[in-house]
Image (cartoon, rainbow, N blue to C red):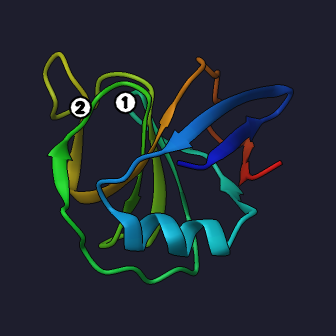
Amino acid sequence: MNRIFVKCGMNRAYAKTVEKNPVTAEIILKNLPLRGRAIQWGEEYYFYTDLEIKEENSQTQMEIGDIAYWPEGKAICIFLGKTPIGGDKPKAISPVNLFAKLEDKIEIKEGEEIIIGID
């Protein structure tokens, strides 16, 4: 497992990669830092990337603190709470590849730059 950080404005939190999707995690790690403007969907925040990663053990049911790659949108998704289609839990709009879990809470605001990197 690798430790990465998520930064938005003055807020910073750490996350650890998970073993469920090793190809996705490897590609993400090789391309850090990744950055983009936060787009909000419920309590999910995402930003677009130039990465093209195929589905790998993809899922739609998520947990708070999950960080995933969205193949259909070529985006990084950070799940901080409920989404419009998830009921009490976050649910992705279409399958995503989970690659990390936040260790800390972070506040993200729509339109701010998100940076995911490694120390």
Give the answer, above or below, for where 86 lies relative to 68.
above
Position in image of residue 50 (x %, y %): 58, 81
Residue drawn where x is 52% and y is 71% of the image: 26
Give the answer, above or below, for where 67 lies relative to 42.
below
Asked if residue 26 lies left or right of residue 56, the reply is right
Q: Quadrant of residue 96?
A: bottom left
Q: Which mark is residue 42?
A: 1
Asked if residue 3 lies left or right of residue 12, the reply is left
State which tag comes first along the sequence, 2 or 1.
Answer: 1
Q: Quadrant of residue 58?
A: bottom left
Q: How many marks?
A: 2
Position in image of residue 64 (x %, y %): 36, 24
Q: Amino acid at mark 1?
A: Gly
Contact between marks 2 and 1 (CB within 8 A): the answer is yes
Q: Amino acid at mark 2?
A: Pro
Q: Single out the residue that lies furthest toward the front.
A: 1
Q: Which mark is residue 84?
A: 2
Q: Say what secondary structure mark 2 lies in.
A: loop
Residue drawn where x is 60% and y is 19% of the image: 104
Position in image of residue 77 (x %, y %): 45, 49
